[in-house]
Image (cartoon, rainbow, N blue to C red):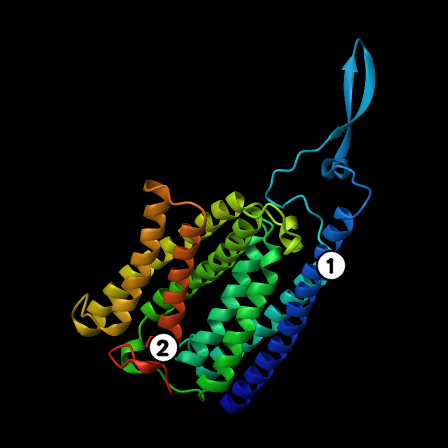
Amino acid sequence: MTTNLATYSVVLTYSAMAVYVVAFITFALDMAKRSGEVAAAASGAGAPKAAAEQKTVATVQGGTVVLERVAQSSDGDGSSRRGTRFERVGMAMTILALVLHVGSVVLRGIAADRVPWGNMFEFSLTGTALIILIFLLVQLWQNLKFLGVFITGLTIILLGIATVNYYVPVRPLVPALESYWLVIHVFVAISGTGFFALGAGLAVAQLVQTYRQGRTTSNKIRFMETLPDADRLEVLTYRVLLVGFVLWTFTLIAGAIWAERAWGRYWGWDTKEVWTFIIWVVYAGYIHARATRGWRGARSSWLALIGFAAVMFNFSVVNVFFKGLHSYSGL
């Protein structure tokens, strides 16, 4: 029975990957379509851009109601833009893929009779599902659908690596992991990673937007004209990474408490502990530099990307190739 559930989990994982690929393609087509629309508008009759963004308002003048056409200002955050058909299909495919993805996580957990993040394969499976879930939930706060290509592409790559290189059969937990802290510590760490991934996508968009806005004459990267400006992207990056930093701070503290319960000390300079702290320091430096030193523009974006590179190094190299008390990859 356990073997069958694990097999069904793998089938659902591959199915989710296939749907993610469809979502990635449709998000890419959305970028191309909007680039074409911007190019067509630029080569049109030369009407001012604001003319296409007008609304009718009613005013009272001397007891008479007067209807006027006035320009509707843009708030610069991209929230007023209507999504294309490709974007809507991409979001629908992403939701469908997440349903399949969560199904594979649940089946793996039932097969293992525990939370499904006891080794690298399970951690990757659950982590990528949370990245997608956070991406979808954030849409309730801010329209960040333009990150669909980045998020689905990253998920496809991570799931592909996990299924090819990290897959292991269902196994019992090692004694050190048999604790309720496994549920708390690892789940919060994965959630923080999801926000860091979202922040990295926004930082890349900010870098591209900064480059485009710094060129006085450029017909390239027209898709970026439909996105928020560089300043707005920087604010969004900061807010998303701030949430991730809070979660990562809890991860660091919870890990120390768990270490004391498991090994009798809060800190032992194990490789995993050191890299968790390095990630915390990088993002703390990003927040401090932006808040107190006035770092803006490309410098803050590059620092955010350095932080995410450290997260990926911790995930792909430290977990697999470095040996220590945290060697739970199962490989």
Q: Is residue 258 above or below residue 224?
A: below
Residue 323, x across and y down, in percent = 27, 82
**Residue at mark 2:** 317
Task: Judge whether 71 appears above or below 294 on screen.
Answer: above
Residue drawn at point x = 37 percent, y = 71 percent: 313
Q: Residue at x 54, y 71 (%)?
A: 155
Q: Position of residue 201 (x, y in %)?
A: 51, 59
Q: Residues within 10 Å of mark 1 (few under 14, many from 20)?
A: some
The amino acid type, in three-letter code, at marker 2 is Val
Residue labelled with disc 1:
33
Instruction: Residue at 44% x, 62% y: name it.
Output: 191
66 left or right, relative to 49: right
Disc count in the image? 2
Q: Residues within 10 Å of mark 2 (few under 14, many from 20)?
A: few
Taking depth in this image into account, of 20 and 247 the one nearest to the observer is: 20
Q: For the C terminus, which image quadrant?
A: bottom left
Q: In the rendered structure, which disc, 2 or 1, sits on the residue that comes first in sequence?
A: 1
Toward the viewer: 261 or 135? 135
